[in-house]
Amino acid sequence: MLDDSTICAIATPAGSGAIAMVRLSGKDTYKIAGKLIRFQAEKKDITSLPPNTIHLADITNEGELIDDVMVSLYRAPRSYTGEDMIEISCHGAYYIQQKILEALVKSGARLAEPGEFTLRAFLNGKMDLSQAEAVADLIASTSAASHKVAMNQMRGGFSSELSKLREQLLNFISLIELELDFSEEDVEFADRKELFSLVRKIQAMIWEMADSFRLGNVIKNGVPVAITGKTNVGKSTLLNALLHDDRAIVSEIAGTTRDVIEDLISIDGISFRFIDTAGLRQAADTIESIGIEKTFEKINQAYIVLYVIDAAQKIEEIDRLAGKIKKRLEGSDRKLFILLNKIDFLTDKHLETIRDLNNFKNLDENDQVLYISASYGDNVDQLASLLVDTIKKENTQENDVVITNARHFEALVNAGDAINRVHEGMKTGLSSDLLAQDIRQVLHYLGEITGEVTTDEILGNIFSKFCIGK
């Protein structure tokens, strides 16, 4: 996919600002830029200036001065793309940006395709494919958590783990294939006990990384939190309290929320996507019935479920509702918080009674039960802190590898299935040639992630989603 043309693009967001940046990369970068740029301090040709330096210059188009610019010079291979590269920082007027781009194209460059600068960085060995994809994630990050995950992956945290796995497997498959060359002598070069131990270790690592995808996906896109419960228990009031905004209509009329309301907020560096759902009851009409159906859909999609119960009810009813939601989520990996709301209406005696979980059949100390007043904000901050802690506990170590990319997840699952076959084959005494075939499959799928095994179609699909100029 790599051609020898010189590409150019505006690398900053569209519109006007204080400054903008135009990128130029390829074998004719200095030849093209030399036609347009005149340095104000150095009376030298652009090709004689040292790389990795910045210079004040004039940029012209057919003799017409366009702007005063700062020009950053890079020489292959010490640049983002691995090619000769120049970045022109100009004033941010849209007219100036377009005039510079027009001048570069007239002088021999062509407009870059989406993600083509990063594609060239990958093809020139400046980064592997998973690191290149992390560039897009880093640009799109909207919270401290998503930024941290993308930064770790771009710095090679994920690639490093995969390289270790592939290197160990390559060592063993080379010995196994050597055995095949000497099959008539019936010799073993690969220690089967050592290989079996390695296979089990790799199994655990692959599936651990694959299992992290659910957490990584919600960190990347915002943790989906469904606020659910019966009508008039204070779900919309709670949403407004969490968002510090009157996002949802609050009314004493049951069934006010008939559709799903969603909003995104960052709490302590983690994005949460709160979803206020229609109250669970026997629907009064078709529209409300559709809203309740959507409620169950959102519960199934949520990572965390906040089940709101009116604390002013009899303790038997609270216990029944708590047991009902726990049974519904039984066996799933969703996190459940049971929120006893409207504590501002309770007498001290009633509050003391419901705080003692021994008074309930369906609740115990292992359940996350909070006592709140959404109307007055009582303990809402505590709820927000618990939500953050829930996500942070899933990723406790600073250098944990968390998978955020669906393509990586699919490849890991395929690699996991292949390594499982290797494990079963070793237990049943499978022949070396068949073992080698399954190990090659593991290597293939791991190589797909880093780009050691890839196709033009895959690359085209990945980089087409990048912004132009990156």
Image (cartoon, rainbow, N blue to C red):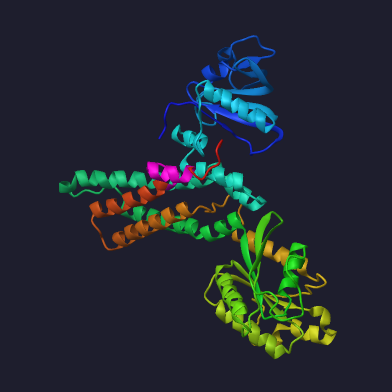
Where is residue 144 shown, x and y percent of the image? 66, 50
Prevailing SS of the magenta stretch: helix
Residue 146 to residue 314: above or below: above
Residue 52 to residue 372: above or below: above
The quadrant of the picture occupied by the N terminus is top left
Residue at horizontal 65 percent and vertical 9 percent from the top? 43
Q: As rendered, which of 441 and 400 lies closer to the eye?
A: 441
Residue 78 falls left or right of residue 44? left
Residue at horizontal 82 percent and vertical 83 percent from the top? 346
Q: Which residues are magenta?
A: 449-463
Quarter-wise, where is residue 424 in the image? bottom left
Residue at horizontal 64 percent and vertical 39 percent from the top? 14
Q: In the orientation shown, which residue stands out farthest toward the top?
A: 43
Quarter-wise, where is residue 85 in the image? top right
Residue 207 to residue 294: above or below: above
The quadrant of the picture occupied by the C terminus is top right
Where is residue 457 shown, x and y percent of the image? 39, 44
Q: Is residue 373 visible?
A: yes
Q: Is residue 160 visible?
A: no
Residue 352 falls left or right of residue 163? right
Q: Give the number of marks.
A: 0
Where is residue 392 shown, x and y percent of the image? 64, 59
Residue 315 to residue 108: above or below: below
Is residue 461 covered in magenta?
yes
Residue 77 falls left or right of residue 70? left
Q: As rendered, which of 37 and 132 lies closer to the eye?
A: 37
Where is residue 112 shown, x and y percent of the image? 51, 33
Is residue 129 covered in magenta?
no
Q: In the orientation shown, which residue stands out farthest toward the left?
A: 184
Quarter-wise, where is residue 265 in the image? bottom right
